[in-house]
Structures are given as structure tokens and as C-alpha cells.
Amino acid sequence: MKKILLIFGANGELGSGVSKVLAQKDYDEIFLFDFKFNKSISSDKIKHIQIADLSDEQNVQTAFNEIPIYKDAEYFLFSTIGGFFGGKKIWETSIEEMMKMIKMNLITNFNIAKSFSLLVKEARGGAINFTSAYTANHPEENKFAYGMSKSALSYLVKSLSIEGEEIKLSAMALAPFIIDTKANRDWMSQADFSKWIKSEEIGELIYDLFKNYKINSGNIIELKLRLE
């Protein structure tokens, strides 16, 4: 039985770390998606697919047309897709800023979820794992638009986990507090980086979750910090 892996946002700091780990695992074919590739891994089983504006459903459908359909295969998808906006009170946030977060964090992943569900429906089953955020369940000051859109993503996961039973699709999400990336180190240069979760550690966790996908659907897994 084939195991097919899809990673969206594979060229970013989280996606590249996760891809590096998962490329070493027992997947038969791996498809990496992003709008550009400048530091991505390569191997005979990896295919790179460039895609623009994931909030456009047609773009997502076109990208999924690149994925072969095997009736006896299991499909797995990890999405890093999303964006951050913060620093403003609710009464300072414009409708444009709020809608941008909805577009980046919810609409994009809805489009991915929809196309992936139709793919899994034709196969043996599979799992999809999104990237939510700790603040989606624990509101923080000056992060309304971001937290609200990530909370909506979590609702998408919960709903998909219920409806996915019909097609043997497991849906879940990770909700990290902070990931050890260059951007975050620059933003919080005085923080204790040793407590931040590494993208490679997330890759190992995703592999374990996918390996046990039949029993963990519907979970939003919070990643607050790593033990030293």
C-alpha cells in the first residue's frame, strides 16, 4: 500500500524543517507546494509544485490535479499555510486587516481541505494536519484578528474530523505558542531560545500523528514549550 505525502508551504522555515524530516520517512511519493523554492530538498520521490494565491480555489484545484490518485493508497497532508498580524487593539483594527487574516488563515486552508477531502474520498483513507496557534484557544492582547482567524481554522478541523469519518479522513492541527525560526529570533532577541520548539521536532511529531491517524482525529494539539 502506497503512502503519499503532501506539504503546503514547504519552502518556509517551518515547512523546510518538517520536509527535511519527513523526506527520510517511509513515504513512497512526496509533493512539496509553495509559491517559490530556493532552499528545498530533492530526491527521486519528491516533486515540487509551484502554486500562487491559495485563497483562489481554482489555483488549489489546479495544483491537486498534479497528484496521482491511487485507490489503494493512504494520503497525508501537512499545511503550514497562514500569516500573522498583531499589535493593535480591536478598535484599532481595520476591516481590511481582519479580512486579510481570515483570507490567509482560514480561506486558504478551507480550499486545501476541500480538495484534499475529494482526493482521499477516492483512496483508502488518510489524514490532514493544519497549523493553528496557541492563541486560538488562549486569547492574548493585541492579537484579535490573528487569534480569531486561527480559532476559525480550529473549527474547520473539528468539523472536518466529524464529516471525514465517512471517507476515512482524519483531521487535526498543531497549535504552537512559538516556533524557533529566524524571524521569531529577530523579533524576540532577548528570549530563551532553548524553550522554543524546533521545526524538525514538529516534523517528528507529525510523522507520529500520521502513523496513528485512525485514533487521533479532531485533536488540536497545543505546543507551549519544550523542556530543556
Image (spheres, rainbow, N blue to C red):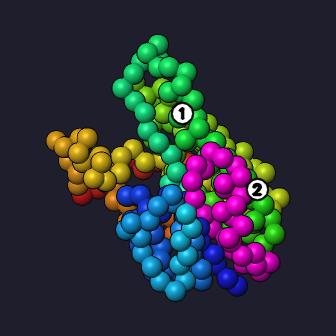
Q: Is residue 97 magenta?
A: no
Could you tell me which secondary element the residue under label 2 belongs to? helix
Residue that extends furthest to the left in the rendered view of this protein: 190
Residue type, numbered disc 2: Gly
Q: Quadrant of residue 143?
A: top left
Relative to residue 119, is residue 56 depicted above or below?
above
Q: Residue at x 75, y 75 (%)?
A: 69
Q: Residue at x 47, y 83 (%)?
A: 43
For disc 2, the neighbor class at 10 Å (few under 14, some 14 to 19, many from 20) is: many
Q: Quadrant of residue 103?
A: top right
Viewer-side label of 2, 1 = 1
Q: Is residue 77 magenta?
A: yes
Residue that extends furthest to the top in the rendered view of this protein: 91
Q: Nearer the viewer, residue 1 or 66?
A: 66
Question: In this rendering, would 50 be left or right of 86?
Answer: right
Residue type, numbered disc 1: Lys
For disc 1, the neighbor class at 10 Å (few under 14, some 14 to 19, many from 20) is: some
Q: Which quadrant: the C terminus?
A: bottom left
Q: Quadrant of residue 155?
A: top right
Counting residues from the start of the chain, the first of labels 2 and 1 encountered is 1
Give residue 111's mark.
none
Q: Nearer the viewer, residue 128 or 225?
A: 128
Question: In this rendering, would 211 be left or right of 110?
Answer: left
Read off the residue under disc 2.
164
Question: In this rendering, would 179 be left or right of 147?
Answer: left
Tell me whether the residue at label 2 lies in contact with that at label 1, contact meaning CB atoms closer than 8 angstroms. Answer: no
Give residue 100's mark.
1
Q: Position of residue 211 (x, y in %)?
A: 58, 72
Q: Position of residue 136 (x, y in %)?
A: 51, 36
Q: Residue at x 55, y 56 (%)?
A: 79
- The residue range painted magenta reads 51-78
Mark 2 and mark 1: Cα distance apart in space: 28 Å
